[in-house]
Image (spheres, grey):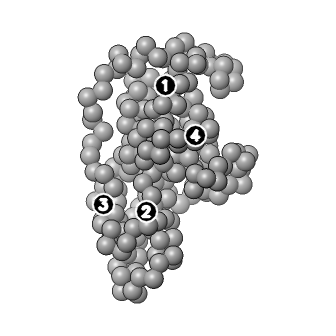
């Protein structure tokens, strides 16, 4: 987990020229101009820090961005910054369609191949930073850590230590990550 602040030296004017006219009504693609959709696709495909920066100043695009996430293909393979992803979930309360959240957590750092030492460090970082992280992200990683434990042959004492620390995570376990909603057909198998 990369622990750094999101306070980058971004300049709003670098993005404003791409933010075209916004229409309140219409379907997703009809509400924004092509250059705006392209900007958001590029920002979504990045580490999300710039996306959060833009949305803080232009919150009217939050719903559009959440909807845009439904079509995320993550061509760049760039992992999302965990703090930026948390901030995006915070900014987008009320627009958490399942496909948006599933595609957002897919962009997070993968931990399935971490060894026990790295997994412990990762969990320690989650615990130290949990007040800065959205409960949905904490729940996602809690489940991923459990999956890592199940899929590896760690010593029972190592597992006990991890399980004890996992119990300290405050999570939102009400979010259902399963793919049985109307967007389930948008799940892209090669992204997993």
Q: Is residue 162 above or below residue 107?
A: below
Residue located at (38% from left, 45% from top): 81
Query: What quarter of the picture does the N terminus occupy?
Result: bottom left
Q: How far apart are the two marked residues, 4 and 1, measured between alpha carbons? A: 13 Å
Q: Which residue is mark 4?
A: 72
Query: What quarter of the picture does the C terminus occupy?
Result: bottom right
Eye-nearest disc, 3 or 2: 2
Q: Indicate the position of residue 174 as horizontal and vertical percent values.
A: 57, 57
Residue 37 showing in the rendered view: yes
Residue 165 showing in the rendered view: no
State which tag comes first along the sequence, 3 or 1.
1
Q: Indicate the position of residue 74 as horizontal and vertical percent values.
A: 53, 42
State which tag comes first along the sequence, 4 or 1.
1
State which tag comes first along the sequence, 3 or 2.
2
Drawn side of residue 82 relative to residue 22, left or right:
left
Q: Which residue is mark 1?
A: 39
State which tag comes first along the sequence, 3 or 4.
4
**Image mark for residue 125:** 3
**Image mark for residue 111:** 2
User: Is the C-beta separation of discs 1 and 2 under 8 Å?
Assistant: no
Label 3: element kind: helix
């Amino acid at each position: 987990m990369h622990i750094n602040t999101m306070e980058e030296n971004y300049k709003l004017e670098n993005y404003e020229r791409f933010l075209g006219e916004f229409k309140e009504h219409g379907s997703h693609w009809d509400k924004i101009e092509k250059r705006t959709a392209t900007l958001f696709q590029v920002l979504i495909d990045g580490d999300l820090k710039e996306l959060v920066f833009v949305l803080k100043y232009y919150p009217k695009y939050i719903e559009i961005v959440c909807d845009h996430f439904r079509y995320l293909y993550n061509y760049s393979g760039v992992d999302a910054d965990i703090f930026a992803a948390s901030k995006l979930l915070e900014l987008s309360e009320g627009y958490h369609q399942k496909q948006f959240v599933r595609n957002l957590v897919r962009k997070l750092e993968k931990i399935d191949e971490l060894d026990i030492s790295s997994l412990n460090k990762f969990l320690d970082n989650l615990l130290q930073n949990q007040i800065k992280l959205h409960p949905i992200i904490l729940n996602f990683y809690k489940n991923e850590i459990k999956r890592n434990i199940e899929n590896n042959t760690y010593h029972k004492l190592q597992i006990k230590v991890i399980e004890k620390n996992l119990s300290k995570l405050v999570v939102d376990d009400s979010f259902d990550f399963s793919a049985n909603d109307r967007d389930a057909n948008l799940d892209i198998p090669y992204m997993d």
